[in-house]
Structures are given as structure tokens and as C-alpha cells.
Amino acid sequence: MEKIHITPKDTCIVIGNGFDINLGLPTSYKDFVKSTHFDDMVKRGNELAKHLKSKFELQNWIDIENELKFYSLEKSDASFKFNYELLTFALINYLEQLDYSLMKRASAAYRLIESISESCDSFNILDYNYTKSIEIILRNQLIDEDTIKRSLIKVHGEAAKNDIIFGVEDSAPIKPEHVFLRKAYPRHYKELNLSSIFAQAKRIIFFGHSLGETDHTYFQNLFRYSCQDGSSYTHKIYNKNFDFLYYQEDGYHKLMQQIDALTSNNLTAFRQFNNVQFMDVEHL
């Protein structure tokens, strides 16, 4: 299990798939399911892929990680592990053919990383994507490789290194024999002391991360402790500065649903004890 050394950082940026989508990259599960990489699995009789395709066609949208839970309990067969591994491999291949020259430099996502790299002496980027977009932007800003290595943490691995973490959370209801779906199952799983990262950060920026159930494990302590009055030990009115960048009203609604769950229905305390801002990237 690889351990990552953490140094004090004032600003922490949490990056989700909405970041790459804002850049103009076709990285959603919808894009993947519509790709030839996915269709090839369906044509070869991959039962998991066929199930996911049928779900997608019903609603024109899909959250593959959540569908894996349902498939484990209701639809799985003896080939499930093999088909799941093929699905992971196909996702890697799909992401590896992305054209990064299409990234929109005028996008809110690109400008955020530009701004952070220019104005912050000390920052961590927790990148939950499998892509190379953040590295490319930082290099375009002439950030040296040592700084990138220290500051950029690929939480779920990298498609380029064939080591992505793709699956479900610890609390997900799955059959015991499907433990391979757990995000902590792979041998290359990275042990991260996120509590230390979040404790050291004065400002935490979420861009394009839905805070969905499959990632709740990473954020539960952060939001629980942020609902407590920190004035006694920080001598400040606010515990932390939180910035949430989302897309349109539906994005805000879904984000608030997850924050409500992570704070155990304690939204008032979260907003009272922290400086919290919400920004719609459509207007940035």
C-alpha cells in the first residue's frame, strides 16, 4: 500500500469529473457508454456491459458506480469479476484516447488552476479524475515537476498508469464475494491521510465533485467536524472557507443533498461555523 507524504498546505482543491467536463472533455459515464470501446464489450456478450447499456437507454443517463451495487445484489453471474475487469480496462482505453488539445482555456476550470498556481504559494490538489488534465494545465503554467509531484494527489489513480480505482464505497451493500468492487481492494490502492490534509487547509475548493455516496468515506470527518464551533481552538469566527463550484440549479440541488447527508442534516451549523460560498460555473 503506497503512502503519500503530506506537507502543510493552506489551500486544498478537490477536483471531480465536472471539472473535466467544464474543460470540454467528454469524460462522463454517458460519453463512455456511447463510445465504441463500450459497444465492443456489448457485442462480445459482456453481461455487465449489456445491463449498463440497457439502463442507460432507459434514462439517457447512468451512474455506473451505483449500478455496480445493484448488479452485485440482483443480476451478477459467475463471470461478473471478469466482466468488471474488462469494463475497467475499456474505461482506461477510452480515457487514454482523449484529445487534451481541445481543453477550453477560457473555461472556469482552466482559469481556477491558473489562478491558484499564480496566487497561492501552498496548495494541494486532490484529483478524483483518472485523466491528465490537471498536470497539463500546471505544466502550461510553467509549474516545475517537483511542485506538481508534491501538490497533485491522484486519489483514484491514473488511466495513463493503468491503475485506476473504480468501484464502490466501504458501506455499499454488495455480496461478500464481490469484495473486488470495493475502492480499497486493489493492490495499488493509495493510503491517504485526508484528515491531515483537510485539517491543515484554511480554504477548501470543490470543483465538479458531486460528493456522491461512493466517495462519502473521504469526506465524512471533514463535514462532521466543520459543523462544530471551532472558535475555542482557532480564535476565529469561522472554522474554514469552503467554495463549491457547481453547474446550474440541478447541480446545486444535488450538491446540497449530499452536504445535508454528510453533515447529518446539520446544514445550519455547517453554514454558521464556516465561510461557505456557492458559485455556478455557468456564470463565471
Image (cartoon, grey):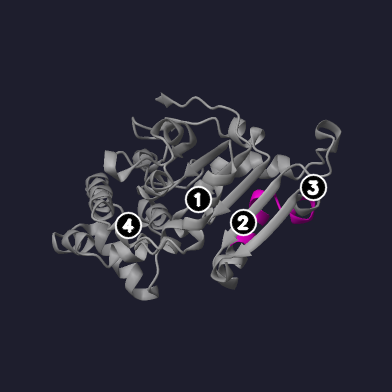
Q: CA distance from mark 4 to mark 2?
A: 37 Å
Q: What amino acid is at disc 1? A: Ile
Query: Mark 4 vs mark 2: which is more N-terminal?
Result: 4
Which residue does the image show at 70% across and 43% down from the upper left? 224
Identify whether 57 is placed above or below 199: below
The amino acid marked with disc number 2 is Phe
Assess whether mark 2 and mark 4 are in contact (beta carbons under 8 angstroms).
Answer: no
Q: Position of residue 18 (x, y in %)?
A: 47, 59
Label 4, secondary structure: give it: helix
Residue bounds of the magenta highlight? 255-269
Residue situated furthest left in the rendering: 44
Confirm or deny contact between disc 2 and disc 3 (CB under 8 A).
no
Q: Residue at x 83, y 39 (%)?
A: 236
| 3D distance between C-alphas at marks 2 and 3 | 16 Å
The percent position of residue 240, horizontal first and vertical second, equals: 72, 43
Instruction: Mark 2: give few (<14), some (14-19) or many (20+) Cα within 10 Å.
Output: many
Q: Which mark is residue 113?
A: 1
- Residue 258 visible: no
Q: Residue at x 27, y 57 (%)?
A: 98
Residue type for callout 3: Phe
Q: Which residue is mark 2?
A: 244
N-term mark: 4 or 3: 4
Residue at the disc numbered 4: 75
Q: Amino acid at mark 4?
A: Lys
**1 vs 4, front mark:** 1
